[in-house]
Image (cartoon, rainbow, N blue to C red):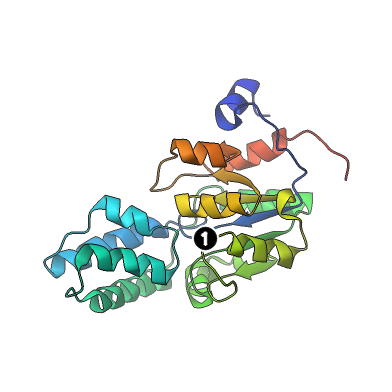
């Protein structure tokens, strides 16, 4: 059982304001360790072309749909930089890594087991394509454990707009305010908050800022701690 002191550190001693009827997961950096992989591939590909990709610039790209992310890269590298070649190299490297298998983040299986036991439906809401979802999560065998997959092309506007999360909630048949959204990126948190969801950030490459603390119900250290938060939720009437 989670201790009151630990609950205070993780959640600010606040219970979730609504019953949790569904859980919506981001993918990259939340379910799988892909953000670090993509960063390293991009830095290496940029250096091979005589350019430098600062950490701060890459962080601006995290959580955005491809078009917006590429616009950030273009603004940094300039119009003469062979961005398409770099992106093709990064994509090839990511595909090769996915074929070998990308590690799930700590606590993924345990959280899914916990949701199974509580009969709580869940979805993925990602800026990645359906093909990328299959390549990234397919080898792990966890995809059948999600009731819906919402990916690029399924919604009109990507993160930080709320559309991916609202689409996922609709597919699960849950009111947004009864959905727990789990995110690792700032743009993802902004999207989930704009959707009116109970949002928990599980930081990966990006640290929690004052803005994130304002928009989130809590900042968790890992998905194991999300389980503790759910366990600490007082029983409520349906």
x%, y% of residue 136?
A: 48, 68
Query: Depth check: 238 or 221 in front?
Result: 238
Outermost residue, left direction? Answer: 50
Q: Is residue 126 left or right of residue 49?
A: right
Residue 117 in view of the camera: yes
Question: Up-down: is 86 above or below 41?
Answer: below
Q: Nearest the camera: 1 or 131?
A: 131
Q: Examine the rendering and report whether any part of residue 185 can be seen.
A: no
The local secondary structure at tag 1 comes to loop
Q: From what the image shows, is residue 234 above or below residue 135?
A: above
How far from the left and from the top, in percent, is residue 102? 43, 63
Q: Is residue 188 above or below residue 96?
A: above
Between 84 and 97, the residue placed more toward the observer is 84
At 59% across and 56% down in the image, what residue appears?
A: 25
Using the rendered view, name the quadrant where residue 72 is placed: bottom left
Image coordinates of residue 29 in percent, x first then y, are 45, 55
Question: Where does label 1 land, which residue?
Answer: 27
Q: Residue at x 34, y 69 (%)?
A: 70
List the single residue furthest toward the top: 5
**Residue 83 lies in what quarter of the image?**
bottom left
Question: How far from the left and from the top, in percent, is residue 157?
Answer: 54, 68
Q: Which quadrant is home to the N terminus?
A: top right
Give the residue drawn at x 27%, y 51%: 55
- Decide which of 59, 25 is in the foreground and name it: 59
Q: Residues within 10 Å of mark 1 (few under 14, many from 20)?
A: many
């Amino acid at each position: 059982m989670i201790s009151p002191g630990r609950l205070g550190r993780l959640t600010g001693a606040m219970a979730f304001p609504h019953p949790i009827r569904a859980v919506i997961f981001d993918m990259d950096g939340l379910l799988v360790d892909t953000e670090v992989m993509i960063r390293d591939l991009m830095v290496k590909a940029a250096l091979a072309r005589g350019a430098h990709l600062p950490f701060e610039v890459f962080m601006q790209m995290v959580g955005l749909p491809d078009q917006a992310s590429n616009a950030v890269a273009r603004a940094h590298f300039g119009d003469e930089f062979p961005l398409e070649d770099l992106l093709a190299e990064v994509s090839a490297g990511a595909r090769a890594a996915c074929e070998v298998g990308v590690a799930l983040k700590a606590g993924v299986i345990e959280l899914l087991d916990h949701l199974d036991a509580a009969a709580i439906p869940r979805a993925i809401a990602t800026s990645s394509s359906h093909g990328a979802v299959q390549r990234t999560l397919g080898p792990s065998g966890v995809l059948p454990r999600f009731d819906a997959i919402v990916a690029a092309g399924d919604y009109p506007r990507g993160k930080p707009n709320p559309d991916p999360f609202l689409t996922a909630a609709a597919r699960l048949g849950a009111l947004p305010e009864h959905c727990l959204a789990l995110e690792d990126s700032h743009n993802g948190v902004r999207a989930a908050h704009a959707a009116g969801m109970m949002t928990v950030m599980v930081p990966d490459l990006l640290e929690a800022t004052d803005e994130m603390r304002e928009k989130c119900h809590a900042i968790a250290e890992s998905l194991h701690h999300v389980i503790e938060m759910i366990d600490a939720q007082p029983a409520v009437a349906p």
